Amino acid sequence: MANAVLDLSPPSMENIPPILDGVDVAQEQPQEQPENTENYACKMSTEVQAYHFGGSRKQATIHTAILYTVHGTKSYTTLSDSLRHDERAVWAHLEPILKEIRATYPQIMTLHVISDGPVTQYRNKANFYLLSTVPFLSGFKHVSWNYSEKSHGKGAPDGIGGAVKRDADLYVRRGGELQTPLDLYEMLTKKSGSTITHYWVNEESIQKYDELVPEKLTAVKGTLKIHQVLSSQAAQISHREVSCFCQHAEMKTCLCYQPVKVDLRDTTDNSLSTPEPPKKQPPQDLSGKFVIVTYDELPYVGQVLQVVGEENLSEQPHATLS
Ligand SMILES: [Zn+2]
């Protein structure tokens, strides 16, 4: 069994000073990797950057990532013309990278994410829900998200963002035109000899994550003190104020520092409401939607591939109690 460590350090857009042209790079040193004895480990560093296009008012959001494995390091950018930086957008940016990790290293079952902890992006129940569902869809079995308190200042400019900026500047100086975020993405993918892998993230794929997050989620107490969130089951997390990896090599969650379990599915109102008679609803197209199904009393996350018949569409699980 093996694991992946994903180090996120994205400053929000507001922290990036306005610039007229070029990529603004906010960089930090990768954090120390938790000790591990596995055959495979990878670590990723992700940052949000903005690229402003000189001639237009358009703007691109760029996440850069570095994946560390025992085989070496790999660099990524994910680009979008969506300027959203919330946790749903972040998961849309992570999705192609997670899928690639799983496809390249099918033996990697555990994903450790390390980030700083801006509440708007990462330390909130929507992100807890996403981290306890999305990685399982890609085939990961265990997830931890670890919040560091480090403040992230500007650092060395020679990161991936710097490389993208140099590429873009050089391209424009040689007479190339970059008018839109997609132009930038296409220029980067066509550039020969690049060691960076690029993915395009469209608005639609971000909206997919909006649909995944339920309107109601269990409130998680003491969110600001949380330093580690662990999950091995859909919508089930345990959290604690200190990150610990002591049983990490055995793929176990240790009980150090009193982890607190939370079921993020908020069922409080359901138990009080009278079950309504099933409404005759127009069949919804559920294809592609995320669902949490209970099987053997354990929740699993899945994606609807095809809807056959209509019989279950308006059925609420809580209404089946009698
Ligand atoms: Zn421990």
Image: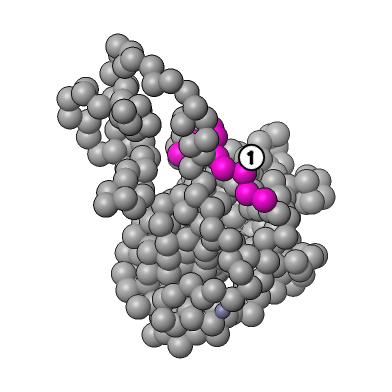
Q: Nearer the viewer, residue 151 or 218?
A: 218
Q: Residue furthest left?
A: 309
Query: Residue at the spot x=55%, y=40% of the render?
Result: 217
Q: Nearer the viewer, residue 58 or 303?
A: 303
The quadrant the N terminus occupies is bottom left
Query: Residue at the spot x=79%, y=65% of the render?
Result: 151
Name the quarter showing ligand 1.
bottom right
Residue 290: % across, % down = 37, 40
Left or right for 136, reference 200: left
Query: Residue at the spot x=42%, y=62% of the render?
Result: 232
Residue 203 at least partly seen: no
Region of the chain picked out in magenta, as a range: 212-221
How dense is the environment of label 1, judged by Cα within 10 Å: few (below 14), some, or many (20 and up)? some
Q: Is residue 163 above or below residue 286?
A: below
Number of numbered tags placed on the structure image: 1
Residue 185: % across, % down = 52, 49
- The residue wearing badge 1 is 83
Left or right for 290, reference 153: left
Q: Is residue 29 above or below residue 84?
A: below
Q: Locate residue 28: give its quadrant.
A: bottom right
Query: What color scheme is it?
Result: one colour
Q: Main secondary structure of the magenta part?
A: loop
Q: Locate residue 212: give its quadrant.
A: top left
Q: Secondary structure at mark 1?
A: loop
The quadrant the C terminus occupies is top left
